[in-house]
Amino acid sequence: MRELLAVPMQAAMGGDVYSGIARAAGTLWCGRERATPGRTTDTVLVFCHPSSNFVGHYALTPAAELGVDAVGVATRYSGNDSQVILENCVADLGSVITHLRDTERYERIVLVGNSGGGGLAALYQSQAENPTIRDAPGGGGTDLTAAQLPGVDALVMLNAHAGRAHLLQGWLDPAIVDENDPYTRDTSLDLFAEHRTAPLDREWVVQYRYAQQRRMRTITEWVKDQLTQLRGLYGDDVPDLPFRVHGTCADPRFVDTTLDASDREPGTLWGDPVSANLRPVTLGSFSTLRSWLSQWSVTDTRGFGPDRLAEVSIPVFVAYGTADRGCFPSMAQALYDGVRHPRRELLAVNGAGHYFDGRPDLVSETLASIIKWLG
């Protein structure tokens, strides 16, 4: 039976949390499945993500059926990635892990970074072992050198990408020539032009990637200029502003499966890439200035998984689905290669999609491999 865990926050919720009730309560809610009702196992798997609500995560029940308690975390930004400050997510994880150790009395805690949670989990453990961050890149972040960040015993990267900023850079549509106009497009960089067919010309893909990097830099420079102007006009009275980003789902790998080859089908996690590219259902379509620098800016974020994994000393397990249409094999390999010690494992789950769609057997098999590895 699914339980709700109420976890007291160690850091106050700021104005980036919409709900006044949530701000006043100062509580993080987690979902837990126990292997045995009324008892806790020695080990608990903790599934995390910066903004997805993992209270009902698909792996909680299968993990409990395999004899290990499982907890799904919802950070203060649950359902609202437009304002995510990764440094505050780290503080929220610290609150959850402190509660699981001190109140629930779990002996071993394994932090599972699923999808966008991979970079967050790696950042958490990096700061738990050596806290250095005192604020977010654009402000509004928790001083992690003064926060409670108990270390975990192992990390798992589950269908994870290397980091949100690098993922978005690979998805940005460089055919957008005016950030305020999604309709006027540079045809030479249009992934969806009628004459563009797979397999894509590799030289063109190189130029496309350069153009994506250029657009990422342009947005980031604009964000920093906006923050400077905002502070000059209002000081601390107006700390942040919102903005929109058009064209956020145009990775060539969505249409050409020979790029970063796997057994996935063409398309995205949201269906047809032409539609997903312009609909506000994908990553980064809405952001604030501070949030952009913390989670989306390649040059400013601290959430690049491979770099953070190079800083951790605990065992790391990387598992990825070969049919995943959002996270590709090179991303899993980058996470695995980031680990600088031999206590690491890389598992390809043949036929698994990003959410193990319709394959509960593969969910259980993957969790069984992780639990066996934990020993």
Image (tube, grey):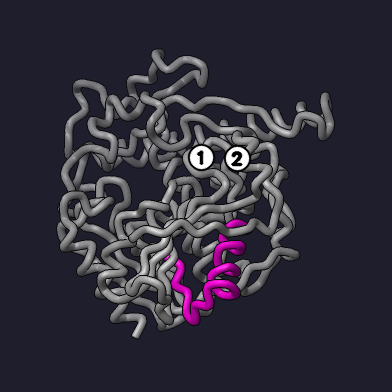
* Label 1 Cα crowd, 10 Å radius (few <14 / some 14-19 / many 20+): some
Which circle marks residue 191 in the picture?
none
The amino acid beneath tag 2 is Ser
Residue 26 drawn at (x, y percent): 65, 50
Identify the residue at horizontal 55%, vertical 57% (top origin).
6
Q: Quick check: 127 left or right of 336? A: right
Is 354 above or below relative to 125?
above
Task: Work out whether residue 100 can be spotted.
Answer: yes
N-terminal of the two: label 1 or label 2?
A: 1
Residue that badge 1 annotates = 81
Q: Quick check: 142 left or right of 205? A: right
Location of residue 365 by image quarter: bottom left
Residue that badge 2 annotates = 291
Q: Quadrant of the N terminus?
A: bottom left
Location of residue 155 by image quarter: bottom left
Q: Which sits in the foreground, 317 or 146?
A: 146
Q: Are marks 1 and 2 in contact (CB under 8 Å)?
A: yes
Identify the residue at horizontal 58%, vertical 72% (top origin).
103
Residue 91 drawn at (x, y percent): 63, 58
Identify the residue at horizontal 41%, vertical 62% (top origin).
32
Is residue 246 one of those drawn in magenta? no
Q: Secondary structure at mark 1?
A: helix
List the single residue furthest toward the front: 38
Identify the residue at horizontal 44%, vertical 72% (top origin).
110
Q: Secondary structure at mark 2?
A: helix
* Label 2 Cα crowd, 10 Å radius (few <14 / some 14-19 / many 20+): many
Q: Quadrant of the C terminus?
A: bottom left
List the single residue furthest toward the bottom: 375
Residue 39 drawn at (x, y percent): 41, 76
Which span of residues is magenta-colored?
90-112
Numbered disc in front, either 1 or 2? 1
